[in-house]
Structures are given as structure tokens and as C-alpha cells.
Image: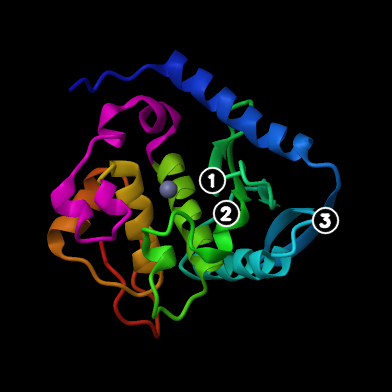
Amino acid sequence: MSYHLDAAKAERTQTADSTLFLRRIGELKTVSTSTAVINGVNLKILTDTRDSQAPLKKFAVQQAVTMVTNRGFKMPADSSFLLTPEVHHQNQAFHFDIQGTPVCWVSLGPTSTSGGSGRGISAEPGTRFDCATRVTLHELGHMFHAHNVGRTRFYTDDRMKAKNPGIGVQVSGYAHQNICKEIIAESFLGMMIGRNYGQDVLQYYQVNGGPRVLAGAGTAGFGIL
Ligand SMILES: [Zn+2]
């Protein structure tokens, strides 16, 4: 396995990524833009007016941002959420704008209210957070992870795509696909909703640049790295 880092390739990937988010917005015929302020963070919410699930998604965005900011995470100055019913618009986070500045651009597609792929923590029954909030937390996990390790490492370090079945199976069915980036995003979501993980998962999370989740006042069970 190569650990070669390629800054030029990272820039190309990031440009393609940020262009895709902007293209998705451009594809929608009618988008209404609203703003919200959560814990001092200005959020921009772009809603396809056909999206009947938009109220659930808006609630999810506000709840997820409240949760992460309560935990001390700092949202980027540009935090924009696209609520879209388009079937080819996945739930996805885009981490850098065209200039390479860290941003939080997240699209929440039609599967976000039913738990995304259906194999992750977001679709598990019996948790106290709705599916769309969990999907949003998963996407924010990717975003903080990308900003933590930086563009070049996030996009071009093969370790970010390396599989680790022993760790993934402990986190979720989706993390069980075992790709490092997904294990990190799922573990982040898990910790945000109060799950505990064993020392081997926490160590894996830390070594791979997982966003540090601190124990908070009044909430038991968060992983401390
Ligand atoms: Zn993911």
C-alpha cells in the first residue's frame, strides 16, 4: 500500500467535489434560500421547493449543528445545506470550496429521512434521534475529519480508503464495509449520540485523525480521546 501524498491530485479532487455541490444546486429549478443562526453559527439552507421532507431535514440540520457546537466543534464560516428530493443527489458532505477553503457543504437527498444507505447507525431502530439528524451528524463527521487531516491527506492518502474489518464491525453495518473514512464518520455519529467504543476503536479513530469528541457535562457515555 502506498502512503504517497499528492497535493496536485488533492486539488483536482477538491475542485471536482466543490463543483459537484454547486452543480447540484444549479440543477434544481426552484430553490429557496433561508438562513438560521444556531449557537452563533450562520447557516444557509437551500431548499428545493418540491422537497416534501424539507421540514424534517431542516429540523435535523438545526439539531445536528446544535449538538456539535454544544460539544465545542466550530462550524466553518460557510455552512450551507442543500435539501433536495432528487434521487441522484446523495447524502454527501463537501469539505472545501473551489479555493480550497474549509467549508461545510452538505446535501441531504431523499434517503436522508429514512437513514441513508440503510446499513448504518442512521437506519438502526431504537435510538432517540431521528434518521435525518443521524445522517447529518454522519456527514458532519466526514467534514470535521477532512478539515482535521487536511485536503491532501483526506483525498490522497490510501489509508483513508483502507479497510479494517475488525474495527468496522464494532461500529455499524455500514462501517462494516470497513472503509476508514466511513468508520470515522460512523464512529463520530455514534459518539455524538452517546455510544461508547472500546479502546481499539478509539485508538483507530485517533490515529486516523477522527474529530475529537470530548465528554460533555451532563452526558454520559461519550468517548474521550
Ligand atoms: Zn459517509
The residue positioned farthest toward the front in the image shown:
87
Q: CA distance from mark 3 to mark 2?
A: 26 Å
Badge nearest the viewer, 2 or 1: 1
Give the residues in magenta: 149-177
Quadrant of the snapshot with the N terminus: top left
Badge nearest the viewer, 1 or 3: 3
| Quadrant in the rendering for residue 170 | bottom left
Q: Residue at x 71, y 57 (%)?
A: 42
User: Is tag 1's residue or tag 3's residue first in the polypeptide sequence?
Assistant: 3
Q: Are marks 3 and 2 in contact (CB under 8 Å)?
A: no
The residue positioned farthest toward the top in the image shown:
8
Badge 3 amino acid: Thr
Q: CA distance from mark 1 to mark 3?
A: 20 Å
Quadrant of the snapshot with the C terminus: bottom left
Checking the image for residue 60, the label placed there is none
Q: In the rendered structure, does residue 164 fall within the stretch colored magenta? A: yes
Q: In the rendered structure, does residue 109 fall within the stretch colored magenta? A: no
Say if disc 1 is inside 8 Å of ligand 1: yes
Checking the image for residue 75, the label placed there is 2
